[in-house]
Image (cartoon, helix red, strand yellow):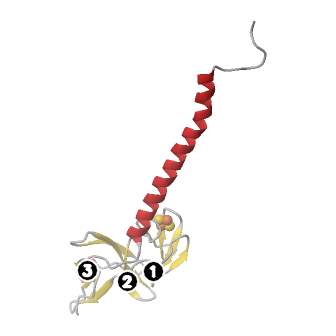
């Protein structure tokens, strides 16, 4: 005689009972890994002195007013943007967004730096956060103008 209602063998019930627990453990594990990765990223992006790096740009290579130029400071391999702003002239910033490290982009239309990852934006003249989740502004780099009109962009002042 077939029993009324639905019943499952003990092993099946046990397996069903464990499934949510397994999912819970997998979810908890993923959450822990995400928290560790997030913490690692946060620590990596904390404002701390950049390693030494620089690039020399000839006057003819400088961006036109209202434009930007992507460069790499060596030997550290730091990606940077050199802006020629209408407000303050030449400025340069480390491209890494202080939120989670995406490279920021120059928006000519908005005359500001924008992060494509979470819609943050930064003031072109100062690198300060204008909107979005970053906890601080972009890291400003040093610019020294040579006698020939070229510039040196560096993570540290060239002259002591
Ligand atoms: S990484 Fe730039 S706003 Fe999130």
The residue identified by callout 3 is 60
User: Which residue is outermost to the front?
Assistant: 10
> Who's the residue at 30% across and 79% down the image?
62
> Who's the residue at 28% across and 81% down the image?
153
Q: CA distance from mark 1 to mark 3?
A: 25 Å
The residue identified by callout 2 is 91
Q: Is residue 95 visible?
A: yes
> Who's the residue at 40% across and 66% down the image?
103
Res 106 quadrant in image:
bottom left
Q: Secondary structure at mark 1?
A: loop
Along the viewing direction, whichever of 5 and 35 lies nearer the viewer: 5
Q: CA distance from mark 3 to mark 2?
A: 16 Å
Q: Is residue 101 visible?
A: no
Q: Secondary structure at mark 3?
A: helix
Say which of marks 2 and 1 sits in front.
Answer: 1
Q: Is residue 18 left or right of residue 78?
A: right
User: Which residue is outermost to the right?
Assistant: 4
**Label whose residue precedes the other's in the sequence (1 or 3):** 3
> CB of residue at label 3: within 8 Å of ligand 1?
no
Number of callouts: 3
The residue identified by callout 1 is 127
Quarter containing the N terminus: top right
Res 160 quadrant in image:
bottom left
Q: CA distance from mark 2 to mark 1?
A: 9 Å
């Amino acid at each position: 005689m077939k029993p009324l209602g639905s019943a499952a063998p003990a092993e099946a019930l046990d397996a069903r009972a464990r499934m949510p627990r397994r999912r819970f453990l997998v979810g908890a594990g993923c959450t822990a890994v995400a928290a560790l990765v997030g913490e690692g990223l946060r620590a990596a992006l904390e404002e701390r002195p950049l390693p030494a790096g620089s690039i020399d740009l000839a006057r003819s290579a400088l961006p036109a007013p209202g434009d930007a130029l992507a460069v790499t400071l060596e030997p550290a391999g730091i990606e940077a943007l050199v802006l020629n702003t209408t407000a303050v002239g030449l400025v340069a910033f480390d491209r890494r967004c202080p939120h989670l490290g995406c490279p920021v982009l120059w928006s000519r239309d908005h005359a500001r730096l924008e992060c494509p990852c979470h819609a943050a934006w930064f003031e072109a003249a100062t690198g300060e956060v204008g909107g979005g989740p970053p906890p601080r502004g972009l890291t400003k780099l040093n610019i020294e103008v040579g006698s020939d009109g070229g510039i040196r962009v560096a993570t540290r002042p060239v002259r002591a």
